Image: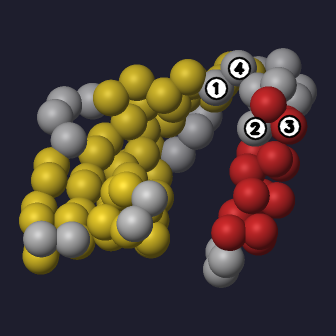
Amino acid sequence: IHGWDALHAQQLIWWRKGKSDVVYTPQGKTEFMLLAPDVAITTEALKSHRTQPDGKVSDGTLVVTSVWKKLAQGWRIVYAHESWVRPPS
């Protein structure tokens, strides 16, 4: 997914325009790595729990890595990647 507008459009689908019951629960501590005074990377494992549109409950575990940059308006994510450790069931 490239660009904020494309990501936002996809998020509306993933989270059913704000009506999703998804709950993300941190698993362990978030890892932080400072690359420069204004650039950092975070990596965190999360459990995911939600009800699918067909009514089935889905649980999974994912790892999210984000690149943060300090901009005039504060720290912002400029790149992120998610990988499923255990796909949703």
On screen, residue 70 versus residue 1, left or right, reads: left
Report the quarter where the N terminus lies: bottom right
Q: Residue at x 75, y 45 (%)?
A: 14
Q: Are marks 2 and 1 in contact (CB under 8 Å)?
A: yes
Distance from label 2 to label 1 (Cα)? 8 Å
Q: Which residue is mark 1?
A: 22
User: Tags 4 and 1 in contact by the CB under 8 Å rule?
Assistant: yes
Q: What residue appears at the point 86 percent right and 37 percent down from the top-left corner?
A: 17
Q: Tag 1's secondary structure?
A: loop
Identify the residue position indicated by label 4 in the image: 21
Q: Quadrant of residue 67?
A: bottom left
Q: Which quadrant of the figure has residue 70?
A: bottom left
- On screen, 44 above or below 75? above
Given the image, on which type of amino acid does mark 1 rest? Val
Task: State the quadrant of the C terminus.
Answer: top right
Marking on residue 15: 2
Which residue is identified by label 3?
Answer: 17
For the residues labelled 1 and 3, say whether their Cβ atoms are less than 8 Å apart.
Answer: no
> Gap in Å between the C-alphas at discs 4 and 1?
4 Å
Q: CA distance from mark 2 to mark 4?
A: 8 Å
Q: CA distance from mark 3 to mark 4?
A: 11 Å
Q: Amino acid at mark 3?
A: Lys
How many residues crowd mark 3 within 10 Å: few (<14), some (14–19), many (20+)?
A: few
Distance between mark 3 and mark 2 Cα atoms: 6 Å
Dot placed on the residue nearer the N-terminal end, 1 or 3: 3
**First of labels 2, 1 by sequence position:** 2
Q: Name the amino acid type tagged 4.
A: Asp
